[in-house]
Image (cartoon, coloured by chain):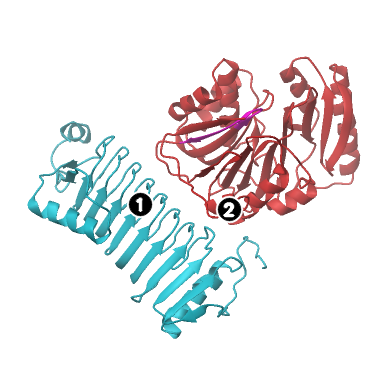
Chain colours: A red, B cyan
Amino acid sequence: MCGIAGLIYMNGRDTIGSDMTRMLQSMKHRGPDSTGYALYRPPADDYVMHVKLADANTPRDFEFADRLRRNRGEVERRLRAAGARISESRDATEYAFTVTFEYDGDLKALADRVEDVSGAEVLSLGHALEIVKDLGDATTVANDYRLDAFEGTHAIGHCRMATESDVDISNAHPYWAYPFSDIAVVHNGQLTNYHQWRRRLERNGLRFQSDCDSEIIAVYLAERMNEGASLEDAMRQSLHELDGVFTYLCVTENALGMAKDELAAKPLVLYESDELVAVASEEIAIRAVVDREIETYDPYEGEVMVWHR
Amino acid sequence: MTYDARGLVELDGTVPRVSEIADGRATFDAKDMTTRMINSELRWLLYEEGILDVTIQNPGARHSLAVGILTRCRITFEGSLGYFGLGVNDGPEIHVKGRVGWSVCENMMSGVVVIDGNAGSLTGAAIRGGDLVVRGQVGARTGIDQKGGTIITLGNAGSMTAFMMQRGRQIICGDVGPGLGDSMYDGTLYVGGKVKSLGIDCVPGEWTEADTEFVERKFRIYGLGAPPELQKFVCGKKLYNYDTLEPAERKLVL
């Protein structure tokens, strides 16, 4: 089933971390397996990268902690060797950490070098994008990763009911659009031409870290945008090229977009005001941040909408 | 409030009994109540206290409110509802001063429901009787499997409206999405706006005096003003019988 939510503040930054937590927690019944956030801090010149070195349910052997420490050291060494100037590297949890660095080379080369380290996966990479995802409900993840203090401009989130692939962090949403900076996607639905698209995109040299069909959308959109399409055009094109039932949200450094398939089989409720735009699978999630009677509506089949800030 | 492993609120069988009751009318504020508390308060008022006019404030877009009400009464929601509201009802007159989510009035047997705002998809699914009036727009698959009753929409409707409809009537004043009346068995559709495309075996129908009388009567009852110019659609009855054509050929014929 899955619950998806998106929130964009039109003027300035706000407490996006705690807002998104409230939205996702109110939709816990749509998916209690894992929760993920793609949060946007105000853009900066340096990059922020979230890396996980193991999964939440990786078996803990005797050398687990040692191995993680070694692998983290290796990741940082490779970043430096690639020319990144690390300004901060902090723990997020036992098996995930966040690095801030300055860098002006090729992002794909950098991400590939990092992911070559055993067990490492780049969850997000960008000037503003920070993806946090883990098992458990929104409150659990927000507490583990201290998201309540996160201030930013816009965010999307996802609470997952796993249907087609495993319950672990790799298969949790949102997906970063490897290797393109600052793009992330959450998705509610099933794609039926997943393998076709995966093979096509893999032939273009793009890597997939999970078996989850939603990862296709992120990489697909990023590739289209890399070819010069706008976010809106890429999303419109996806309606024709992706098969299945889906409603998905995509975020970039300065925009939030939604797309709904031709069957309109997956719900989305929309609220727009001068200060913010909130979208979610259920109105109850929007009411978690706008606590009053509001006018909302459901977008129709085949609709694509994009909000810029 | 405690939640179980699925994120659902723990069941609590006690009725809050917080309503203000005067002159046979009751009002209560649902702001800090769970779905179960709201429903048990409503049932206590209707079935045990015999109150037949209940107003519920701040429903807060919660799901599954006022479901399975089997008595004649008047219920007013001063706000929006979430999904699966007002389902399997038989008798009540309900006014929602807000919007509703997916699957409102599913399988309603009789009664009247008026929604001031928009409605989500699957509005009036499998409805068997009664009148459902939506002043805003409705989502996809409105009146899917409709078996009776009337659904009136003042705004636009989405795709696959009246999919597999079997009886009853729908009046849609606005535009309708693709696949209107797909695979309908019977029943009548009236559309005021543009139809993006007709579904399989849905064809324009011949307008009669009875149609004018019906539409004008319904608009008069609910104070909706003068009805717009409507176009009528009915079942083409081509799918009633098997024929000897191959599926591909049959597609051409239809």
Magenta extent: A251-260
Quadrant location of the C terminus of chain A?
Answer: top right
- Image-quadrant location for residue A251: top right
- Badge 2 crowding class, 10 Å Cα cut-off, few under 14, some 14 to 19, many 20 or more, is many
Report the chain holding disc 1: B
Q: Residue B78: where, in percent of width, then height?
A: 47, 62
**Inter-mark Cα distance, 1 to 2:** 22 Å
- The correct choice, above or below, for A202 with respect to B196 in the image is above
Q: Which residue is mark 2?
A: A287
Is residue A143 visible in the rendered image? The answer is: yes
Q: Residue A134: where, in percent of width, then height?
A: 72, 45
Nearer-the-camera pick, B202 or B221: B221
Q: Which residue is mark 1?
A: B135
Give the number of marks: 2
Main secondary structure along the magenta-highlighted residues? strand
Kindly state the secondary structure of the residue where label 1 is placed: loop
